[in-house]
Structure formats: structure tokens, C-alpha cells
Image (cartoon, helix red, strand yellow):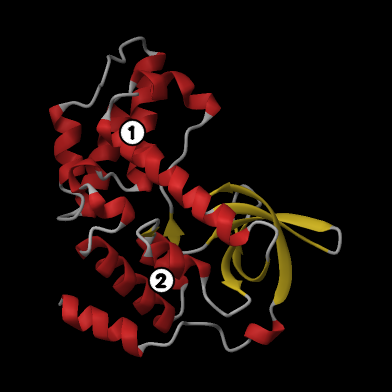
Amino acid sequence: MHKIASLLVENLPTFYPCDFSRLEEWRVIFVYDGDTFLVSRKGISKTIRLAYIDTAETRRDSDQRVENINSVNDIYAHQFRYGDLAKDFAFRTLLNKKVKIKTIDIDRYDRSIAEVYLLDQTLFQIELVRHGLASVYYRYLAISYDPLRVLLVVNEYLAKTNLEGFWSSPQSIVLPDMFRRLKRVHQKLDDNGILEFNILSDRILLDLSNQDISHVEAQRRMNSLISDT
């Protein structure tokens, strides 16, 4: 499987849309994290959220108490380490650079969900996934073009099997979407005055350890935990 995936990546061109030359150029003026940044063009600015992928979470001032309680929790430490690395990669690659934006949708926070291309036609999402700095957001992948879908999935597979970046410590991996859910569980426990140091229970750990085997089932169980809290 690894050999087939490598051959696919070698023989598929870097994907770019047929209307690349018609896409508007924007300048990146601020990087919030690995998958979210601010762009400007002709006096207009807007927030971009990268489509199809999810980078690890970074620390948030509003969640400081829960994060401090879990400061020696490997899952938290791993998430924040690679969240910071993804942000640094975006900072070095994009800040003050021009990019081309293909907007796919507008989310509930009024962010433009978009494909972001460097001027050499490289899709930035692919670069993040290839370096193990982002996971594919399968929930939203269906809206992408087929060649792009293949490239994202294959590059993620290679990053995982090669233990690149985020995938380097399998025992500490929690996908960003599930990590956000886990933090919400912790926040509810803390609001009720019952959050203990390094709170992860065997029940939650079992859900997280099964991510690769049955991500859908793990998410279902995590949803159940949240609703029960």
C-alpha cells in the first residue's frame, strides 16, 4: 500500500484548478494559526479558513484554566506542540506573501472557507498535510474535486506511515476535531467543580485509542460523553 501511495504522489501533478489564472491575488497580513489567517486586497480584508484540512489546536486565553490543569497531559502537550509548529509553518510560508484564493463557502463565523494557492500553483493545504502538520477533514472532503481529494488522502497516508510531524507519537495523537470535543468535556467538568488533575479517564482514553480503527464510533462515544456531562 505504501508503495502504491508513493507512486500515486509521484505521478499525480501538484493539483491546481483550471481557472488558476483567474483567481484573485490577496496578501496575507496576519496568521492566527496553521489553518486560519487574514488577507487583504484593495483595502478589503477577510479571514480565510483553509478548506478540507484541520491543523492541531493552539492555546487559547479563554481556555487557560483547563489547559493549565492539563499542562502535563501528553495529549494536550502534543496537540499544542504541533499547533504551534503548523502556525509557524504558515507564518514563514505565507505572511506578507501574495496567494490566490478560491472560496468554497462562508462559515458561520463569516470566514471564507477556501483553497489557498501559492503563486507557483502549489496548494498550501497539500504542503501542510505532506509535512504532517495537518489532518484531512473528512467531514468536508466530499466537496473537493476528485484529483485534489486523492492527493490529500494519499499525502496524509504517507505522512502517517512515515510518522511525520503530528503523527510521530501515535500514543499522544488526538485529531484536532476530537481534541476540541475533549476540551469541551473538560470545561463542563470544570464548570461543575469536578475537573481533576490530568482528568483523562479510561473510558475516554479507550475512545481516543480507537480513532484509526473507527473514527466515527469514537466520535459517537465522545458525543455521548459530552451529552451525559
Q: Amino acid at mark 2?
A: Ala
Pick the residue in front: 78 or 106: 78
Could you say whether the residue bearing mark 1 is in a helix, strand or loop?
A: helix
Residue at 24% from the left image edge and 79% from the top image edge? 5
Image quadrant for the N terminus? Answer: bottom left
The residue that label 1 is drawn on is 76
Residue at 37% from the left image edge and 71% from the top image edge? 152
For label 1, count other residues whose C-alpha is less than 10 Å away and answer few (under 14), some (14-19) or many (20+).
many
Indicate the position of residue 13 as horizontal and vertical percent values: 43, 87
Count all numbered tags in the image, as a single digit.
2
Residue at 41% from the left image edge and 67% from the top image edge? 141
Residue 189, placed above or below residue 44: above
Work out whether residue 34 can be spotted. no
Q: Quadrant of residue 171?
A: top left
Pick the residue in front: 94 or 197: 94
Residue 181, placed above or below residue 228: below
The residue that label 2 is drawn on is 142
Residue at 58% from the left image edge and 53% from the top image edge? 91
Tag shown at residue 153: none
Residue 56, placed above or below residue 158: above
Q: Amino acid at mark 1?
A: Tyr
Image quadrant for the C terminus? Answer: top left
